[in-house]
Image (spheres, grey):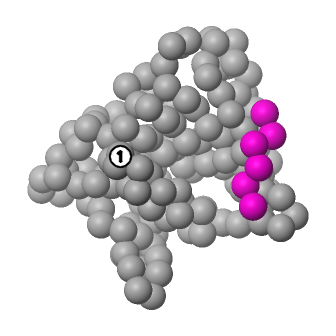
Amino acid sequence: MSGTGEIWFYHLERSTLDQVLPELLDRTLQRGWKARVRIADADARDAIDERLWTWRDDSFLAHGLSDQPHPERQPILLTAGDENPNGSQALFIVDGSAMSLTEEFERCFIIFDGRDETALHQARDRWKALKGQGANLAYWKQSDEGRWEKAA
C-alpha cells in the first residue's frame, strides 16, 4: 500500500456527517477534483443525496447517484460499489462502508462518528491494518472551537 494516495480519518465528535461531508466535498471540488462517496446503507445515501441539494440556502453541490444515467458526468457520485465512472480523485467512505480499492485515489476520507462505539472500534481496526500496510495516514479531530486539527 505504500506509494498510494493519502488516507485521512475524520473523527466526528462535535459535528455530524450532514455538517462535515458537504464542506469537505465543496473543498474537494474547489481543488479541481471529482469525488465519490461510498455509502453502503440506502437510507443514508438518500439522506446524503437530499442534504447535498440543500446544504446551503444559497448553494447546492451538484451530484448524482451511480445507478442513474450518466454517472461519468457527475462531479460528485454517490455509490455503494467500487466502480469509478466519473474518474474521481477523492473517495469518501462513510457509514462503515468497505475499504476496498482505495489505491486509485489521490485522497481517501474515512469519516466516522466517534460517539458510536461500533464505528469507533471499526475505525481503530482500519487504522491499525492500514498502518501495518505502510499507508500514508492522517488523523483529524475537532478542537473545542470546532476547527479540524491534525492529531496524527
Closer-to-camera residue (29/84): 29
Closer-to-camera residue (39/137): 137
Asked if residue 119 shows in the view, the reply is no
Residue at horizontal 42%, vertical 41%? Answer: 90
Extreme residue in the left direction: 69
Extreme residue in the right direction: 144
Give the magenta-colored segment's residue range: 147-152
Q: Secondary structure at mark 1?
A: loop
Q: Where's residue 24, x and y in %?
A: 52, 56
Question: How crowded is the residue under tag 1: few (<14 C-alpha within 10 Å), some, or many (20+)?
Answer: some
Seen in the image, is 62 located left or right of residue 14?
left
Seen in the image, is 83 located left or right of residue 106?
left
Extreme residue in the bottom direction: 57
Residue at horizontal 45%, vertical 61%? Answer: 26
Closer-to-camera residue (150/95): 150
The residue at which mark 1 appears reads as 33
Q: Where's residue 133, x and y in %?
A: 62, 11
Q: Where's residue 117, x and y in %?
A: 79, 48
51 shown above or below 142: below
Seen in the image, is 36 located left or right of residue 70?
right
- Amino acid type shown at disc 1: Trp
